[in-house]
Image: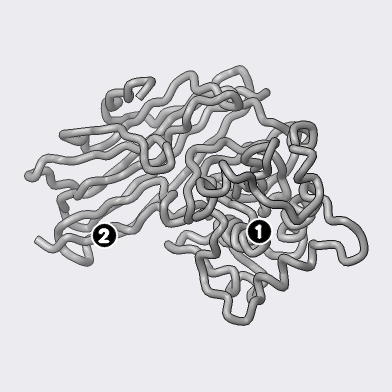
């Protein structure tokens, strides 16, 4: 169990005043058995005219913001603050709850679950020479039964050990083939590689976006920004989370904000502006994560716009501004 406080700043700066199109945020986690959300606050400057909360097709909490047509600004600043308690499953729980019928791979999903998992089991990217397939099959034992959870853990840690992590601010996610060829990538690249690898084996996988924190002095890469990892459906154990960037299993040190079918569906902040095409100057993203019962000494900037309303607990040329990149 860990008490975690997160401050996530996103700021766009413009050379000349611009208008703002609708922006979509995915920054608020869903309260669950493994995550208790105590408080969630959103500050936005300039203040939107309308704000609406909804659940997307995957059940993630998303915020839609609109500004008045006559609003012109040289910046857009969004600050999300979260106060939560995390109860990670830990690597032992999946083994303890695993359906005995799927301890050994391969296995088949049950008739009632298979239709709901179908799209998440499909390969989403071309692999004409089956390179991803070949890479995935190196984790299958040729001489004795392949045990499902150890196989997935081995794949997770192989990516951590064999590939070089590089933070990348540019938009988009590299294809698994590009990652295999270069031997390097950002957390979203490693996540997509693992997703397509397990899908090639017939397993269902989701892309997870959220935050990474360090506990008990454990070092981790991918902090200081949003983070990405994957969840794989294993009957009995459910959606087991794997972070191939750090070799973490079962949600250790990972705060889940949203889970989607593809990386493009999990952008933390997305939107655009209308005005001069070259008005955009730069994007700043800063994530601060504080672990412990005592609140951080400095959590807020000197000045912020008034907070926006919290959602119900139950629930000229138009230019696409650069999205806050999917997790680096």
Left or right placement of residue 179 versus residue 126 in this view: right
CA–CA distance in space, label 1 to label 2: 33 Å
Q: Which residue lies furthest to the right in this view?
A: 143
Residue that label 1 marks? 198
Q: Residues within 10 Å of mark 2 (few under 14, many from 20)?
A: some
Give residue 110's position: percent from left, percent from top: 63, 44
Give residue 202's position: percent from left, percent from top: 64, 59
Examine the rendered structure and indicate whether residue 228 appears above or below residue 84: below
Q: Which residue lies furthest to the bottom in this view?
A: 129
Q: Residue furthest front?
A: 111
Examine the rendered structure and indicate whether residue 78 appears above or below residue 13: above
Res. 70 image quadrant? top left
Examine the rendered structure and indicate whether residue 178 appears above or below residue 27: below
Left or right placement of residue 194 versus residue 308 in this view: right
- Which residue is nearer to you in this view: 53 or 234? 234
Residue located at (16% from left, 34% from top): 49
Q: Do the residues labelled 1 and 2 touch (CB within 8 Å)?
A: no
The answer to whether residue 297 shows anywhere in this view is no
Residue that label 2 marks? 320
Residue located at (58% from left, 52% from top): 205
Residue located at (47% from left, 55% from top): 262
- Which residue is nearer to you in this view: 319 or 64? 64
Give residue 17's position: percent from left, percent from top: 16, 52
Residue located at (76% from left, 60% from top): 158
Mark 1 / mark 2, whichever is N-terminal: 1
Mark 1 or 2: the one toward you: 1
Q: Is mark 2 on a helix, strand or loop?
A: strand
- Quadrant of image for the N terminus: top right
- Which residue is nearer to you in this view: 146 or 309? 146
Give residue 322's position: percent from left, percent from top: 33, 58
């Amino acid at each position: 169990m860990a008490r975690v406080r997160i401050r996530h700043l996103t700021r766009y700066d413009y050379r000349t005043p611009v208008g703002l199109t609708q922006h979509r945020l995915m920054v608020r986690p869903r309260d669950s058995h493994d995550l208790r959300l105590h408080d969630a606050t959103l500050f936005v400057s300039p203040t939107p005219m309308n704000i609406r909360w909804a659940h997307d097709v995957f059940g993630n909490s998303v915020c839609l913001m609109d500004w008045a047509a006559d609003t012109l600004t040289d910046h857009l600043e969004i600050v999300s603050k979260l106060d939560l308690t995390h109860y990670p499953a830990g690597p032992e729980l999946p083994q303890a709850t695993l359906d005995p019928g799927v301890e050994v791979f391969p296995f088949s999903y049950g008739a009632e679950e298979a239709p709901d998992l179908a799209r998440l089991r499909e390969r989403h990217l071309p692999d004409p020479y089956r390179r991803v397939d070949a890479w995935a099959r190196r984790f299958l034992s040729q001489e004795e039964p392949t045990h499902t959870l150890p196989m997935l853990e081995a794949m997770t840690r192989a990516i951590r050990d064999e590939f070089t992590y590089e933070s990348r601010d540019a938009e988009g996610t590299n294809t698994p083939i590009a990652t295999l060829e270069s031997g390097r990538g950002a957390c979203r690249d490693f996540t997509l590689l693992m997703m397509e690898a397990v899908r090639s084996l017939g397993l269902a996988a989701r892309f997870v976006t959220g935050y990474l924190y360090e506990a008990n002095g454990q070092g981790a890469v991918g902090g200081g920004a949003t983070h990405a990892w994957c969840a794989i459906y294993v009957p009995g154990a459910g959606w087991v989370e794997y972070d191939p960037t750090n070799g973490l299993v079962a949600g250790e040190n990972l705060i889940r904000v949203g889970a989607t079918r593809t990386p493009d569906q999990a952008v933390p902040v997305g939107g655009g502006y209308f005005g001069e095409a070259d008005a955009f100057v730069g994007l700043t993203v800063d994530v601060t994560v504080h672990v412990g019962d005592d609140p951080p000494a400095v959590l807020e900037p000197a000045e912020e716009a008034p907070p926006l309303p919290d959602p119900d607990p139950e629930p000229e040329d138009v230019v696409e501004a650069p999205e806050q990149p999917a997790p680096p």
